[in-house]
Image (cartoon, rainbow, N blue to C red):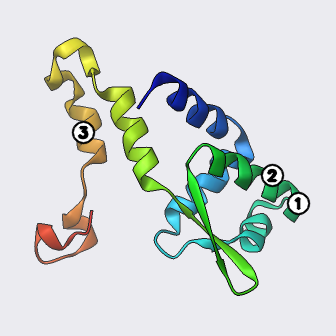
């Protein structure tokens, strides 16, 4: 990822409604949410939500797919992965042990989600 792309993504997330919208979409992966439902959950008019979703889509954070009369939006988790790696790639000045708390927070918590084997976690 290039710096300009990271700045674009962070700029898109640097507004309360867009950040809340993106987090809601992450929480509703993989099924996604219809644009009208996102607007209802956020308490903003549909035309305003459309502008927010367009900004998130331009930054590569969401994808919309038409299903009948609705557009279903989903978070683009690949963009989040790339941004996260960009932000922490050179973590802690080459002392990776200092990044252990970050990695631990990101690690799947299979023991609390209940799958019988770690490979069943889906993370």
Q: Which mark is residue 98?
A: none
Q: Is residue 45 visible?
A: no
Which residue is label 2 attached to?
51
Q: Identify which residue is drawn at 27% across, 70% down.
A: 113
Q: Under tag 3, what secondary structure?
A: helix
Cβ–Cβ below 8 Å for labels 1 and 3?
no
Circle 1: is it few (<14), some (14-19), or many (20+) Cα within 10 Å?
few
| Percent x, y of residue 86 | 37, 30
Is tag 1's residue or tag 3's residue first in the polypeptide sequence? 1
Nearer to us of marks 1 and 3 is 1
Q: Residue at x 16, y 17 (%)?
A: 95
Query: SS for tag 1?
Result: helix
Q: Nearer the viewer, residue 79 or 44?
A: 79
Quick check: 64 above or below 14? below
Q: Closest to the observer: 70 or 100?
A: 70
Q: Residues within 10 Å of mark 2 (few under 14, many from 20)?
A: few
Q: Relative to 120, is 18 on the left or the right?
A: right
Res 82 → quadrant: top left
Q: Residues at badges 1 and 2 in contact (C-beta under 8 Å)?
A: yes
- At horizontal 30% and vertical 43% (from top left) the residue drawn is 105
Name the image quarter holding residue 114: bottom left
Question: Label 2 to label 3, Cα distance in Å?
Answer: 34 Å
Element class at badge 2? helix
> Residue 103: x, y in percent?
24, 39
**Which of marks 3 and 2 precedes in the sequence?**
2
Q: Which one is in front, 77 or 4?
A: 4
Q: Which residue is mark 1?
A: 47
Indicate which disc residue 103 carries.
3
Relative to 64, residue 10 above or below: above
């Amino acid at each position: 990822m290039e710096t300009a792309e990271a700045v674009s993504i962070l700029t898109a997330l640097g507004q309360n409604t867009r950040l809340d919208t993106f987090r809601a979409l992450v929480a509703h992966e993989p099924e996604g949410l219809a644009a009208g439902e996102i607007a209802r959950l956020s308490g903003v008019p549909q035309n305003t939500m459309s502008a927010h979703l367009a900004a998130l889509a331009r930054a590569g954070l969401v994808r919309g797919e038409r299903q009948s009369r609705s557009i279903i939006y989903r978070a683009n988790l690949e963009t989040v992965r790339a941004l996260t790696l960009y932000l922490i790639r050179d973590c802690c000045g080459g002392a990776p042990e200092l990044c252990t708390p970050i990695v631990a927070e990101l690690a799947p918590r299979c023991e609390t989600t209940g799958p019988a084997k770690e490979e069943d976690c889906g993370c």
